[in-house]
Amino acid sequence: MNESIIETFPESEVLTDVKSEQVRIIFASTPTSLFAILLSSFILSAVLWEVIEPATIVTWFCLTNLLSAIRLFLYYQFRKLPFESLVSDIWHRRAITTSIASGITWGAGGILLFSEQSMVHQVFLAFMIGGICAGAITTLSAITAAVRGFVFVALIPAIIKFNLVESEISLEMTIMSILFMVMILVSAQRLNRTILESLEGRRQREMAERTIRRQAHFDELTNLPNRRLFLNNLRQEMAKADRHRRFGAVFFIDLDRFKSVNDSLGHAVGDELLIAVAHKIAERLRKEDTIARLGGDEFVVLLPEVGDDQDAAGNHASTIADEMRKLFATPFMIQDNEIHLTISIGIALFPTNVPAEDLLKYADVAMYRAKHDGRDSVRLFSEEMQEAVNQQRIIEKGLRQALANDEFELYFQGQYDDNHHLVGAETLLRWNHPDQGIVAPGVFIDIAEQTGLIVPIGEWVLRSACEHLSKLGSDLVLAVNVSPRQFSNPDFVENLKQVLLETDASPKRLKLEITENLAMANIAHTIVTMNRLKRLGISFSIDDFGTGYSSLNYLNRLPVDELKIDQTFVRNVSTSSDHAIIVDTIIVMAQQLNLKIVAEGIETVEELDYLKSRQCKYFQGYYFARPVPFDQFSESIA
């Protein structure tokens, strides 16, 4: 597997390491510290030259500055380390060891350079050692062990010496030295705490910035680039392809029926499956290719070079995509669940004269064509698809204007019993287009579903139907189709209750028609929602029954009142044995479940007679009445 494609985020990026920064602070101050030691040791040696044995002074001076030379050598070695790399523990130990060793030389000076005959020189020695310790606060406080070790070994010998010597102020000097040491250590501790808080704060900021960058460019679940980063990469590759006259490709990949996995096995399994899918796709990619997740079950792939001419590039890209598709023939094992999955892939080639965003849309359109043609397939974007895209954009824009300009209208088609008595009607949406006249829903419903406009359109349909229902004086029941998106809205029940209240429509005269696939998509949610609405008095019908995948077991669980036989089965039922068998089966099933049956699409007396002979009681179709506007429908029943 090409793991490098998945591990795209720079996980090796080094954040501020507090321990490493502590060592850096100490080594950064080394030149200043060594210069202060050289100058102080020279002044101290010169002042004490007359009262201390010169050989002792020279020995101490040389040892002190020899150690300084070693520290300077280590300083230059440390500077050779890569900038902002993690510092090994050995450098941490060296920082502490050399600091304590330096303190020992000054502690030795407190004994070797102590003049028992001259109180003035004693005080000067204490002053110099105290000054060096005070300076150590600023240079060594980053590491507590270093500053404490230095101060202890530098001051304790002098304190002991003051305590042992018999002079007028030896006791006072001892006490003052101890107090000074305590103050130095307390100050060092405070400075150490400030440094650590500053370093930790810096680390937290870097972590926050890294998280923000990651969230801005990478998918949290799969570690793949997201849409933004993918489009940035795509723009760069499109520019390169244009310069070098080579073709690249974009794959838009969608998992077929992934929602059913989430609904049946849960989102945890769905998430694991998405991660496994990312790795599966990466198996067929090269190191230079890029895979990204746009969200949900949508992935995209960028292949920078697939051919020198458009035909060859298209063939090569299609071959790669088909090989990728075939990888999914092997089922996934997720949490002991064997999951069979297929993918639909749309391909768009570049360079082209459109921006990266539009190229991605082209691949998306090709993917939808693959789904439309039966799923588990690959389609290459073509000019024909471009025309479909343009038409879709026109319709989408028109739908938005239709909502704003109140261009929608409800038509009503009567439903009749076996005595030809009107018992209800179905509301059918029509679009009064300002240029094209009446537009049937078959032209725009799919686009409304894809763009999400079906939700506001569906809300308009329900409100308008309830308004008309309240105006009908008879006991007719009005059937209204509900879209999957509208029905799955968590606020659907409350919104409908509010509409019924505002329009004063009777819920007992309202029937909601849902499709088999909608009912089965998330049956638990469907049952809960239907029961909430049935408690209001609303009834339910399964529309276009026989075209979906419901079973008798599932159907028995749904609180439905009616089945509508799809018109594709009703058509030619009297002459087609295949249609007749399906219709007979549906009617028997409905009778066993004690459900009402409505046959839609009745156009001939032969179809009607056949259905009556099979005990079907309710009918709808052109044989009885065509869909008409409300005014015309209300006049016909007056």
Image (cartoon, rainbow, N blue to C red):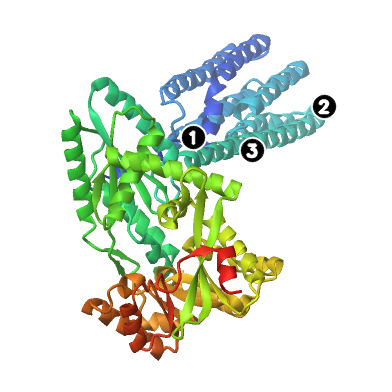
Describe residue 469's horizontal placement relative to residue 174 as left or right.
left
Q: Residue at x 38, y 89 (%)?
A: 615
For residue 343, which quarter of the picture? bottom left
What amino acid does circle 1 point to?
A: His
Tell me if mark 3 has few (under 14), some (14-19) or many (20+) residues whose alpha carbon lies within 10 angstroms of its own.
few
Q: Residue at x 43, y 63 (%)?
A: 268
Q: Secondary structure at mark 2?
A: loop
Q: Which residue is mark 2?
A: 169
What amino acid does circle 2 point to?
A: Ile
Q: Residue at x 53, y 32 (%)?
A: 21
Q: Which mark is in front, 1 or 3?
A: 3
For residue 585, above or below residue 463: below
Describe residue 384's horizontal placement relative to residue 43 as left or right.
left
Q: Earlier in the sequence, mark 1 or mark 2?
A: 1
Residue 611 seen from this side:
yes
Tell me if mark 1 has few (under 14), some (14-19) or many (20+) residues whose alpha carbon lies within 10 angstroms of its own.
some
Q: CA distance from mark 1 to mark 2?
A: 41 Å
Query: Which numbered tag is attached to residue 24?
Result: none
Query: Which numbered tag is attached to residue 92?
Result: 1
Q: Secondary structure at mark 3?
A: helix
Q: Earlier in the sequence, mark 1 or mark 3?
A: 1
In the rendered image, residue 302, in percent from the top left (x then y), is placed at 30, 38
Q: Residue at x 69, y 19 (%)?
A: 128
Q: Quadrant of the C terminus?
A: bottom right
For residue 500, above or below residue 160: below
Q: Earlier in the sequence, mark 2 or mark 3?
A: 2
In the rendered image, residue 496, in percent from the top left (x then y), is placed at 62, 67
Q: Which mark is in front, 2 or 3?
A: 3
Q: Which residue is mark 3?
A: 197
For residue 549, above or below residue 395: below
In the rendered image, residue 41, in percent from the top left (x then y), is placed at 61, 15
